[in-house]
Amino acid sequence: MSLYVLTGGAGFIGSHLADSLLAGGHQVRVVDDLSTGHRRNLDPRVELLVGDIADPALVGRALQGAAGVFHLAAIASVARSNEDWSGTHRVNQTGSITVLDAARQQGRIPVVYASSAAIYGDQGESPIDEAASPAPNTAYGADKLGSELHARVAFHVHRVPTMGFRFFNVFGPRQDPASPYSGVISIFAARIAAGQPLTLHGDGLQTRDFVYVEDVVRHLRAGMEVLHAAPQATVLNVCTGRATSVLELAQALARIDGRPLAMSFGPSRAGDIRASLGNPAAASAVLGVRATTGLETGLAATVRSM
Ligand code: NAD
Ligand code: UD2
């Protein structure tokens, strides 16, 4: 049994990871300011430290005795990163450096961290692999790319092992549908559950690579194992390699619901990416893990949880 620290562990992805680590017999300590995460997402066996990820004293204390850190805390809203540029930078990039620095000071604890497909920007329809040139077009994406660069420094200068995961569009139970910038699947599933019509921004033919949260958790855990076996600084996509349009998504949810689809088309969202599709080959080679949950299976589980 090992102690793992999860920053952002009270959030959507982090709370699923906490459940998986507990089920594996590990001890879990979460650092979270509960800004978008919730206590109710956490199993009572989890130790929760409520506070800010950019606070070096808190993070230093939290990492004591840890076998590894999963750094997931961030302000995950792109819209907020564009409105509150320096405020989100403090959390999304300084927060990452704070975690990496504490990992260095506590004896080079391995760090697995969340990056994002946002570092790629808009690159067209072919599957993107890790060798593509980063071109973020939001402050959020720029801070995720900056965090990757500092994670590289952590290893090459300070010998702290790091693995960054460029998540594509993650979905599943506990994803909060509350804001207009929440994940489209959480918004659509909540609206269908409430009997409300869906709004598709633009023609609905924009595509995304939707990856189920349990598959993401398997990548994160495999990443930690790889770092324990072979210290390195690596960055990998977390995706399925399958593109789904927003219209196809709405139709699949309606099939699960069993009622006719009620939807309308609104204006395109400013700066919306037309196509986003990842190549999962490198993650599969390095980790021996692939995203295997089919879209309909994952959607059905998400709808059941509403
Ligand atoms: P989430 O908002 O549910 O989780 C983020 C957690 O971080 C929350 O519990 C929040 O309370 C916490 N947090 C925010 N600011 C903090 C601070 N200053 N100090 C301490 N805790 C703080 O979002 P999520 O979808 O679970 O995202 C997890 C990670 O994955 C984030 O780094 C996000 O950027 C990244 N990511 C998510 C997706 C996706 O599709 N959900 C895609 C790409 C990247
Ligand atoms: C995702 C990430 C974001 C960032 C970005 C990188 C989520 C929640 N957001 O944004 O953090 O990493 O990728 O490029 O994963 N849509 C509708 N109707 C709705 C809501 C959304 O049509 O009611 C459309 C939206 O315009 C977009 C698509 O659905 O074309 C997906 O939207 P999203 O907000 O779930 O995710 P995305 O890819 O814009």
Image: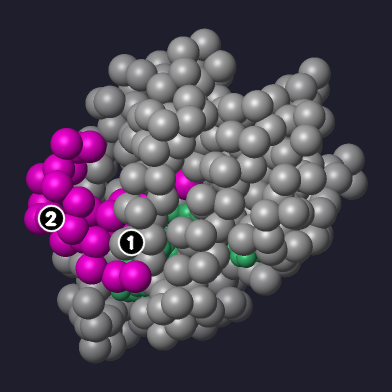
Give the answer, above or below, for where 82 lies relative to 283. below
Which mark identifies residue 123? 2
Residue at left offset 83%, top offset 43%:
46
Check disc 2: other Cα within 10 Å, few if <14, some if 14-19, many if 20+.
Answer: some
> Which amino acid does the dot numbered 2 rest on?
Gln
Tell me whether the residue at label 1 lies in contact with that at label 2, contact meaning CB atoms closer than 8 angstroms. Answer: no
* Cβ at disc 1 under 8 Å from ligand 2: yes
Q: Position of residue 87 (x, y in %)?
A: 51, 77
The residue segment tinted magenta is 114-139
The image quadrant of residue 273 is bottom left
Residue at left offset 45%, top offset 77%:
86
Check disc 1: other Cα within 10 Å, few if <14, some if 14-19, many if 20+.
Answer: many
| Residue sitting farthest toward the bottom | 267
Which mark identifies residue 283? none
Q: Which residue is mark 1?
A: 141
Q: Is residue 133 magenta?
A: yes
Q: Position of residue 195 (x, y in %)?
A: 55, 79
The image quadrant of residue 245 is bottom left
Give the answer, above or below, for where 164 lies relative to 155. below
Locate ligand 2 by image quadrant.
bottom left
Q: Is residue 127 magenta?
A: yes
Q: Position of residue 229 (x, y in %)?
A: 52, 11
Secondary structure state at the residue bearing disc 1: helix
Between 96 and 83, the one lying in front of the other is: 96
- Quadrant into which the C terminus falls: bottom right
> Which amino acid does the dot numbered 1 rest on?
Gly
